[in-house]
Image: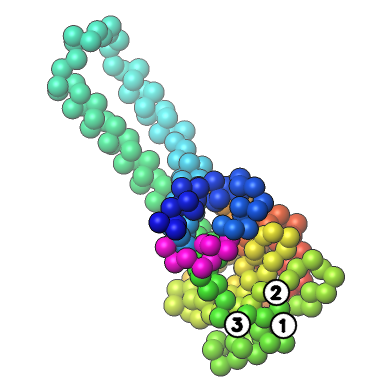
Amino acid sequence: MVCEPYKSKLDTYLDRELPEPEMRSFDSHVRSCLSCSAEALGREQLQRSIQIAGRRFTPSAEFRKRIQESLASKPQRNFVLSSFRPGWLLSAAVVICAVFGVFNSHYLGSRSGSDHVFSEIADLHVATLASSSPVDVVSTDRHTVKPWFQGRIPFAFNLPELQNTGFSLQGGRMSYLDQSPGAHLIYDVGKHHISVFVFQDRAVPVSIGKNSSDPQQQSFNVETWRQGGLRYFVIGDASVDDIHRLAELFKQ
């Protein structure tokens, strides 16, 4: 099949470890192949979920103390293989399942509303870039892209002048956050794609601070702010400096 050579190297592609000519070929193929773009999106989301979960599954001091006290209260015995019994194995399995349940509950309970919003924004960013048609209005001219949104979203916004900044506008599309319509703009800097989302501030269901969430919990660099009744998100795998520079252009 035509896609087999691509799918066999998809993980290497997502890790950005292929030679430059192959990366360009992959970029072109993934943007035009619905099957490979869906596969790339699924793997990217899985990688990001694993990274976040790996950083968050940290037992609390109280939980550690309870486990240590429980182990200390048990009589110490020297076990040999012949002493294992089905009942002991069943008990061990129950304990393992219980510990996993505690970790899982702790993880789910610790997800704050702002974490959920950032996760949604990251999903929108990845899904768009994996799409065969990432933008609905294709243009590098802000005077073409901005008017396209008129009548499609219930607010107006400005786009920055990019001359001599290193950024280039690729186009835009409509996006939705909790069913609220907004603008999604895509910019390039170097070899990186950056998404800029603009929503009405009241569409964001939780209070979010001026700075982005903990970067150690994100697969992308993110910057967000509120201005003129609108909520802006700038997200991508570009450097923190590039994300900040593009954010500053919008603020100005």
Residue type, mark 3 in image: Val
Q: Earlier in the sequence, mark 3 or mark 1?
A: 3
The region drawn magenta spans: 27-35
Q: CA distance from mark 1 to mark 2?
A: 7 Å
Which residue sits at x=24%, y=7%?
80
Badge 1 element: helix
The outermost residue toward the front is 1
Q: Badge 1 local density, few (<14 within 10 Å), some, or many (20+)?
A: some
Residue 79: give x, y in percent of width and height.
26, 9
Which residue sits at x=23%, y=10%?
81
Q: CA distance from mark 3 to mark 1?
A: 11 Å
Disc sitting over residue 142 in the figure = 1
Residue 59 at least partly seen: yes
Residue 29 shown in magenta:
yes
- Tell me: residue 104, above or below residue 157: above
Tell me, yes or no, whether the two marked residues, 1 and 2, touch with CB atoms within 8 Å. yes
Q: CA distance from mark 3 to mark 2?
A: 11 Å
Disc 3 target residue:
137
Disc 2 target residue:
169
Q: Earlier in the sequence, mark 3 or mark 2?
A: 3
